[in-house]
Image (cartoon, coloured by chain):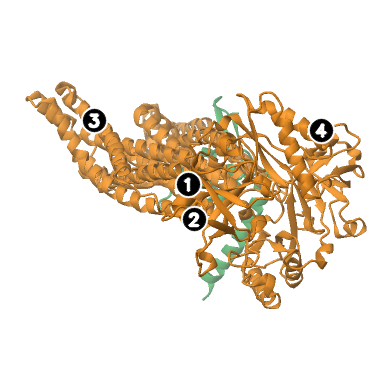
Chain colours: A orange, B green
């Protein structure tokens, strides 16, 4: 077996590193050849000088042979590349000004593109760390508003049918999320809450994740001891069991019931979203329940080999239609299911579209940055046009020249890319801090904005892209340029040939793009603030918010017991010195409503669709004061409203504007169509001031809250609001102690935040969007100014000599300033016009995304954009104009 | 005395000739060129322009290796030696050449 290949490769690599030594060896070898020839000639009787001359003559072009000999080593291309790189670095240093502008501009563009990409990829293309995750899907009912149950989840009975009838296409599993308490009897600790899932027995078969210890739940172990098992997460194993290896078989209480640990999942496994406990669910006893009463499930699954989502959907739809005919009472109008990518289950609707817009804008900013780099590289090449042309004439191939200019662009892009990566890291960290600093809900485990492998790959792609965009066209131009014309050009920089129509067009494009982005960002900010501008009418920092759920506990089967617990806890807490107010509210955050349809007495609604929406909120009388809701007319709810008296409600001002425009609502009666309040007429007794509601974001039909007395509607779960002193968190411990005193087995409330925290989190995504749009707007303006500056400066520089002469013969500085300013005026005007038109179009899109048709796009926003773009453009042109007016005639003439 | 009408080396055979000449013992570039001329009775001449690239190519392919040796003149001279791979390659090329030249001769000799 020959190792010739290895040796050959070794030789080539050696040659690469010994290029200098090799070159000198070639020289000596050829010299030696000539010496031998000389010696031979001398033997023939020639004198030494004659002999050598003859030898050299006969040998021919020594230099060419040297080149050819060196070429035979095959390192020529690499050496040239290396030389070009070295020259590129030299250029970078020599033209430090333009180099740094180009690098900064590219770093900004690449930085923002990478940030957005990492942000979007965290949500849209996350790494679930699950094999074959692309086959995962979730399914739920579609168009459920008119259906009898109005719920998108699929009930147990329907799930069974779907599972059986689609078993050849996909594996369907189901789960229910809940947040139980976990207590280990042997440990003397507070009960803790963990997000958990009740899962169908074969749930783990879709993830195929191997447990770290023990087993997952399987149909086999489920059959032996249904619903007494629990699989715990790595977190729970660490926090509750100190990573004890013998944890399998240990017992713990979940919502009071004993479960045996059968398995521990590996670190990071929190499927389906943020779950820490998995308990097999036995839904078999719901077989006796009617379809309307049987439990609702989240259904997910994994597609079979080669099965498309659409194929599964078609099958499920046909099953749904059959169910609708067979069971009209429960399934009427439930005719279609959605089968979507799994992660979209956790992505708010409309977010996908917003992400696409973000990506689009990021690329737009990147493109503007690349246009700048393009003009800068073009300008640099133009300055070197004389040199490049001479090289071309002396025989440098087009390829050589193109390569050199492209390497110039490549170096700029690489430096820009590195800068961009650093920038992206900083900005991503900032975004994460906005998004994830307050975590009230349990966020899916894959929500992590980070610079990962995909992102790095993206950066490389972007660098190549920006190299190509910024340097290939300039390079081709240089290579193509006419030598004669160039050499004749007295300016030696041949502006006419270089900074042609394309550059001017690009500058116009940059200004248009920046005007567009600035207007879009102003609009988004204004609309966003108008919609979610929560100027809360109370000091939200001082109100503690938590929740309590009596459903978990076995001790609260009856309404009376629940009622007693709530009033005892309230009395207990209000008895503590320092507590100013302690209130309950039925909605999750104390303020924002869950919308429901309702009707007003005496109004005929042809179709259910036409009924208005409102958010009912069952609360204690003192909650009005706590939430800053001011009475406008009528009366508030008070302690005289009890279960025995007529059912009453207070409505928000927005309700009046929306649904009682022409008559006083006081004394009118309204009725909700489902839930706890179903079919009870409620008399309106008062009107309170309105809150700016987050729910406006999702639906503009929600016209405000309807407030009901807690005394008339027994609560099972409630938000607790506490105010007292400057530090609301000081009430956490007393509250936990009071709850333990009243009901030792009851779960402690999970999270404690202030109302302000909650609002911040509700707004966090919007805040991120606004922040990003501001970045886009600011960057676009900056980049466009740089672009405008570089082009104007280039043109002004071209006419340096002319300005010098004009100054010398008495032209005023002012006239020269005007002259330079005039160069740019049309780009600015046309750019602004185009940008504003496009921006207004984008405004309409933003309006429709935010459901903000009511908020008009007005003149001030357009004027603000106009002013911003004008100021930046003017500033960009001023510097070259000022320099033109200060040209020293002597210097200008000497520089030639 | 040089003959008129000396032929340049046939395309593609220079490597074969170099290997053959070097197989007789280590030689420097000039000696290789001269040896080819001598052995061919001055029929073939080697151009310097193709000799050195060919030598370097063969060295890169590891068929020959070079050393700087001190010769008669007391100056270091770059000398080429055949490697084992080179011996194998030479054998291959010779048999190939014989095959081809026999075929060409056969065509020429017809009629």
Instruction: Please tell me which residue lies in front, A675 or A697.
Output: A675
Q: CA distance from mark 4 to mark 2?
A: 44 Å
> Tag 4 or tag 3, which sits nearer the N-term?
4
Q: Are marks 1 and 4 on the same chain?
A: yes
- Inter-mark Cα distance, 1 to 3: 53 Å
As measured in the structure, the alpha-carbon distance from the residue carrying label 1 to the one carrying label 4 is: 40 Å
Earlier residue among tags 1 and 2: 1
The residue drawn where x is 69% and y is 28% is A731
Disc 1 marks which residue?
A653
- Say which residue label 2 marks: A701
The mark lying in front, picked from 4 and 2, is 4
Give the quarter of the image for residue A596: bottom right
How many discs appear?
4
Taking depth in this image into account, of A73 and A276 the one nearest to the observer is A276
- Element type where label 3 sits in the image: helix
Q: State which tag comes first along the sequence, 1 or 3.
A: 1
Label 4: few (<14), some (14–19) or many (≥20) C-alpha neighbours in 10 Å: few
Whether residue A610 sits left or right of residue A317 in the image: it is: left
Subunit ID for the residue under disc 1: A
Residue A676, image x and y in percent?
67, 55
Marks 3 and 4 share the same chain: yes
Which mark is in front, 1 or 2?
A: 1
Residues at discs 3 and 4 in contact (Cβ within 8 Å): no
Numbered badge on residue A878: 3
Marks 1,3: beta carbons within 8 A:
no
Disc 4, SS: helix
Question: For the point 44% across and 36% down, which residue is it?
Answer: A108
Judging depth in this view, the residue of A607 and A271 nearest the camera is A607
Determine crowd level at label 1: few under 14, some 14-19, many 20+ residues with C-alpha closer than 10 A.
many
Q: Position of residue A576 (x, y in %)?
A: 71, 26
Counting from the top left corner in percent of width and height, residue A652 is at 51, 47
Dot label at residue A741:
4
């Amino acid at each position: 077996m020959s190792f010739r290949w290895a040796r050959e490769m070794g030789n080539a690599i050696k040659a690469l590193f010994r290029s200098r030594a090799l070159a000198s060896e070639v020289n000596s070898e050829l010299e030696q050849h000539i010496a031998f020839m000389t010696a031979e000639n001398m033997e023939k009787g020639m004198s030494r000088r004659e002999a050598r001359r003859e030898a050299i003559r006969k040998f021919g072009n020594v230099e060419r042979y040297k080149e050819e000999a060196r070429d035979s080593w095959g390192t020529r291309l690499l050496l040239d590349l290396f030389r070009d790189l070295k020259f590129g670095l030299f250029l970078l240093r020599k033209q430090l000004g333009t180099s740094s502008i180009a690098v900064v501009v590219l770093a900004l563009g690449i930085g923002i593109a990478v940030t957005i990409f990492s942000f979007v990829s965290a949500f849209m293309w996350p790494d679930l760390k699950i094999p074959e995750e692309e086959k995962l899907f979730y399914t739920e009912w579609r168009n459920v508003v008119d259906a009898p149950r109005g719920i998108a989840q699929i009930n147990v009975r329907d799930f069974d049918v779907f599972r059986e009838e689609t078993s050849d296409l996909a594996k369907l599993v189901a789960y229910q999320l809940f947040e139980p308490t976990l207590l280990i009897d042997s440990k003397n600790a507070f009960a803790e809450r963990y997000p958990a899932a009740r899962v169908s027995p074969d749930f783990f078969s879709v993830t195929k994740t191997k447990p770290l210890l023990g087993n997952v739940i399987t149909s086999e172990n489920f059959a032996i001891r249904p619903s007494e098992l629990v699989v715990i997460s790595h977190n729970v194993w660490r926090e509750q069991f100190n990573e004890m290896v013998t944890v399998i078989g240990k017992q713990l209480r979940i919502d009071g019931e004993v479960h045996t640990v059968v398995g521990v999942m590996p670190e990071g496994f929190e499927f389906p979203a943020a779950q820490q406990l998995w308990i097999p669910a036995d839904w078999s006893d719901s077989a006796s329940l009617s379809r309307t009463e049987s439990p609702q499930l989240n259904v997910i699954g994994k597609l079979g080999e080669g099965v498309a989502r659409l194929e599964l959907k078609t099958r499920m739809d046909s099953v749904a239609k059959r169910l609708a005919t067979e069971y009209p009472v429960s399934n009427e109008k439930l005719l279609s299911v959605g089968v979507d990518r799994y992660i979209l289950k956790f992505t708010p609707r409309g977010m996908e579209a917003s992400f696409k817009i973000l990506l689009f804008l990021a690329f737009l900013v990147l493109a503007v940055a690349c246009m700048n780099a393009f003009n800068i590289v073009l300008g640099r090449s133009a300055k070197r046009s004389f040199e490049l042309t001479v090289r071309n004439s002396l025989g440098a191939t087009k390829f050589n020249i193109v390569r050199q200019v492209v390497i110039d662009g490549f170096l700029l892009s690489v430096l820009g890319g590195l800068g961009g990566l650093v920038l992206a890291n900083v900005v991503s960290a900032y975004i994460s801090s906005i998004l994830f600093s307050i975590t009230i809900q349990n966020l899916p485990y894959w929500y992590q904005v980070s610079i990962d492998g995909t992102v790095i790959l993206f950066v490389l792609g972007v660098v190549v892209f920006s190299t190509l965009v910024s340097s290939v066209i300039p390079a081709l131009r240089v290579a193509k340029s006419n030598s004669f014309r160039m050499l004749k050009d007295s300016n030696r920089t041949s502006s006419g040939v270089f900074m042609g129509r394309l550059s001017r067009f690009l500058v116009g494009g940059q200004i248009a793009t920046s005007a567009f982005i600035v207007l879009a960002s102003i609009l988004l900010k204004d609309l966003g603030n108008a919609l979610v501008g929560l100027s809360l009418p109370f000091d939200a920092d001082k109100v503690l918010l938590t929740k309590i759920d009596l459903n978990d506990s076995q001790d609260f089967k009856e309404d009376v017991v629940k009622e007693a617990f709530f009033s005892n806890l309230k009395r207990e807490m209000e008895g503590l010195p320092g507590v100013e107010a302690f209130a309950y509210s039925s909605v999750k955050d104390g303020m924002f409503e869950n919308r429901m349809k309702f009707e007003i007495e005496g109004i005929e609604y042809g179709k259910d669709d036409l009924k208005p929406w409102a958010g009912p909120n069952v609360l204690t009388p003192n909650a009005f004061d706590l939430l800053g809701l001011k009475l406008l007319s009528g009366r508030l709810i008070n302690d005289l409203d009890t279960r025995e008296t007529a059912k009453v409600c207070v409505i928000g001002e927005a309700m009046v504007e929306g649904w009682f425009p022409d008559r006083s609502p006081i004394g009118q009666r309204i009725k909700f169509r489902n839930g706890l309040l179903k079919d009870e007429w409620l008399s309106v007794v008062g009107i309170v001031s309105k809150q700016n509601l987050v729910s406006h974001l999702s639906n503009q039909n929600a016209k405000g809250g309807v407030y009901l007395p807690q005394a008339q509607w027994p609560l099972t779960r409630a938000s607790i609001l506490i105010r007292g002193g400057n530090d609301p968190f000081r009430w956490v411990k007393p509250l936990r102690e009071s709850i333990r005193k009243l009901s030792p087995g009851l779960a402690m409330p999970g999270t404690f935040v202030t109302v302000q925290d909650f609002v911040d989190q509700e707004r966090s995504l919007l805040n991120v969007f606004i922040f990003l749009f501001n970045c886009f707007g600011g960057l676009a303006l900056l980049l466009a100014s740089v672009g405008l500056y570089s082009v104007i400066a280039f043109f002004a520089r071209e006419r340096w000599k002319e300005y010098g002469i004009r100054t010398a013969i008495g032209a005023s500085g002012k006239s020269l300033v005007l002259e330079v300013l005039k160069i740019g005026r049309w780009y600015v005007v046309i750019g602004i016009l185009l940008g504003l038109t496009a921006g207004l179009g984008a405004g309409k899109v933003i309006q429709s995304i935010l459901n903000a048709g009511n908020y008009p796009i007005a003149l001030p926003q357009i004027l603000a954009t106009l002013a911003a773009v004008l100021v930046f453009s003017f500033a960009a042109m001023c510097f070259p104009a000022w320099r033109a007016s200060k040209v020293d005639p002597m210097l200008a003439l000497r520089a030639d | 005395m040089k003959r008129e009408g000396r032929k340049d080396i046939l395309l593609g055979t220079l490597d074969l000739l170099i290997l053959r000449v070097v197989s007789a013992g280590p030689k420097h570039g000039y000696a290789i060129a001269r040896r080819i001329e001598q052995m061919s009775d001055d029929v073939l001449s080697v151009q310097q322009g193709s000799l050195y690239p060919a030598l370097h190519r063969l060295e890169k392919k590891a068929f020959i290796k070079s050393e700087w040796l001190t010769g008669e003149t007391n100056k270091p001279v770059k000398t080429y030696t055949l490697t084992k791979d080179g011996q194998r390659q030479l054998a291959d090329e010779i048999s190939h050449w014989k095959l081809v030249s026999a075929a060409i001769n056969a065509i020429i000799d017809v009629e």
